[in-house]
Amino acid sequence: MNKNKKYYPSVGKPVNPVDIYNYTNIKKQISDMQKFAFGVEINVMIMTDRLPDIAKGLQEYMQNSSDITVDFVSCLNEAKEIINNKHIDFFIIAGYLKNELNFNAVELVRKYNRYSTVIIYALLDPYITYFCRKYSIKAKYDRTKPIEGFIEYMRNCYSYKNNNFLKDNPADTTREQLRLNATHEEYFADQLREQERINAENNARINAKKKKFKDKFILFLFVAASTLMILVLSLFDISNSH
């Protein structure tokens, strides 16, 4: 094992179905897609060390835009080179990262531009939830959804960050080109609350099943013990009668 790599503790295996949401699927979705504009010039960096085809599909999708510049990286060193030479508006992680050291790019992006948005583009399973919480990644997009909706999701994220930028820098009007009325802090909070509600319901169901099984097992033991006691007493009475 490579000693320079860090691996996740056990949080359950990631969802790994037959992946129909692959590059071929993305390519099919964007084949007839016309050119579009994001609304303002932005720089996007996509990282993956596990799903290069998915990242390639995302990159080709964004290249349909007239105002999005996209860079693809597969490791922390490549990310450092991009971050040192370019203002990053969006850092998109395709799937979970196999090498945990690569997650240091998240903090690096935020260090250089605290208004950057980090988005995880993945199958949203407990594995993804684990490292989203660990690295404070609030924005996540389910890659089983139509890819066309991803650009709108990015616009909404940008609107929220843009509004915060203008509050902190009232004299700067360079970002007023994009005016979208999105309250994504509330949206992200709603997402987390919804996920927590679903998890609570699932846990409640599991606990209810465990309790039901436990109650049945206790009843079985009680009946078995009672039956055995009656049998022993009956045998004792029979032996005494002789």
Image (cartoon, helix red, strand yellow):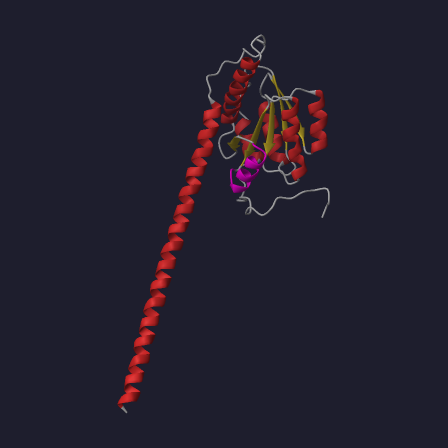
Q: Name the side, left or right, on which 224 lies relative to 19.
A: left
Q: Name the side, left or right, on which 67 lies relative to 184.
A: right
Residue at x 35% of width, y 71% of height: 225
- The quadrant of the image that shows the C terminus is bottom left
Q: Which of 60 and 165 is in front in this view?
A: 165
What secondary structure is the magenta-colored segment mainly? Answer: helix
Q: How many marks?
A: 0
Q: Position of residue 152 (x, y in %)?
A: 50, 22
From the viewer's perspective, is residue 141 above or below residue 14?
above
Q: Where is residue 220 in the image (x, y as percent from the top left)?
A: 35, 66
Residue 149 inside the magenta-drawn segment: no
Hey, which residue is sitting farthest front in the picture? 240
Q: Nearer the viewer, residue 198 or 41?
A: 198
Q: Position of residue 170 (x, y in %)?
A: 56, 10
Hey, which residue is sitting farthest bottom in the picture? 242
Q: Quadrant of residue 66?
A: top right
Residue at x 59% of width, y 23% of height: 62
Q: Which of 197 and 99 is in front in this view?
A: 197
Q: Where is residue 201 in the image (x, y as percent from the top left)?
A: 40, 43
Which span of residues is magenta-colored?
124-136
